[in-house]
Image (cartoon, rainbow, N blue to C red):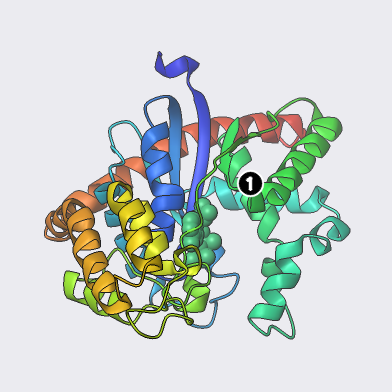
Amino acid sequence: MSQQKKKVIFSAMQVTGRLHLGNLEGALRNWVRLQDDYELYAGIVDLHSLTTSYEDTGEILENVRQAAVDYLAAGLDPEQTAIVVQSWVPAHCELHALLSMITPVGWLERVPTYKEKREQLHIASPSYGLLGYPVLMAADILVYRGEVVPVGRDQEPHLELTREIARRFNHLYGQTFPEPQSLLTEFAVLPGLDGRKMSKSYGNCIYLSDSPDEVREKVRTMFTDPKKIRKADPGHPDECPVYAYHVAYAPESAEETKRACEAGELGCVAHKKDLGDILTEALTPLWERREALIADPGYVDGVLQKGAQRACEKTDETMELVWRAMKLR
Ligand code: ADP
């Protein structure tokens, strides 16, 4: 496929913390698969991190660098894919300001994650930026005239809002933006150490920057089936995160493991030790690439500068169309 004909994707992760295995399996690996067939902009959306972490901003820049290392270590090819730090590309903010003028507050107040975040993080007085998070996300996608967005089922409502904002702009000022279509990606949600979904906000993560020893230690403390107290007790693998990881990382031996656990032949301590080995083996190539990248910060900076330059070329084109459509140029 020639570069011109490839459809545009902007997809991103925020950097309130380090990236974890859930981010790797649920997002990064998918981008790596998509990068040959799409014009992919892989965002590191640092401004989004400010919606909840505006007081303590000291770690964001280091998280940005670490995310860039993770993106590259997971296999994004900077010759094909632009790795884009959001705040380095001013058009994200410009379009956000313009879209915020045409987005009714009622639309934003109805977004389920707004309410969830307020409750989860105990935010008594939410900022204008937190409410406007989906508008910034719409700007992120539309400023590339993104046509396709890879989403999990839970992210569909956000994308619908992006489409509504695009439609409203097109209706007011003339056809400017494509309505981005979702590329529904089915993947298993990876559980965290405590059995809930692995998430930065739960502090139950295995981070891509963890050392092999840290990973083994975390696996050792992992939650298992509470009904299996001794090795001989019959286990319930489908309720056990250790088994979920086993299925994800060593599917070939999963069936036999399930049988042995249910039959009381395999104890949790031994299973966790196996899983430590399995994960270490599976992650070693990524760890080796990470180490090489960390030793070469000049290369990583160069990738980000080149990514920002490519992004600016694309987004400047879009902004020219936008200003003209709004008769401000
Ligand atoms: P977090 O919950 O840690 O804040 P994000 O919401 O920033 O993670 O997610 C970034 C990307 O990683 C999204 O595409 C999301 O679907 C994916 N992702 C996050 N957690 C998991 C998980 N536990 N399993 C699979 N994918 C995940």
Residue with the mark numbered 1: 139
Residue 32 in picture, x, y percent from top left: 36, 38
Residue 3 in sight from this viewpoint: yes
Q: Residue at x 37, y 67 (%)?
A: 263
Q: Does the numbered disc 1 mark a residue whose Cβ is under 8 Å from ligand 1?
A: no
Front-lying residue, 112 or 170: 112
Give residue 208's quadrant in the image: bottom left
Which amino acid type is marked by label 1?
Ala
- Assess disc 1: are there few (<14), some (14-19) or many (≥20) residues with their C-alpha within 10 Å of its C-alpha: many
Q: Residue at x 52, y 35 (%)?
A: 9
Q: Residue at x 35, y 72 (%)?
A: 264
Please state if 193 lies on the left or on the right of 218 as rendered: right
Please state if 242 lies on the left or on the right of 189 as rendered: left
Tell me: residue 37, above or below residue 244.
above
Residue 145 in sight from this viewpoint: no
Image quarter in which the C terminus is found = top right
Q: Residue at x 71, y 61 (%)?
A: 132
Front-lying residue, 88 or 179: 179
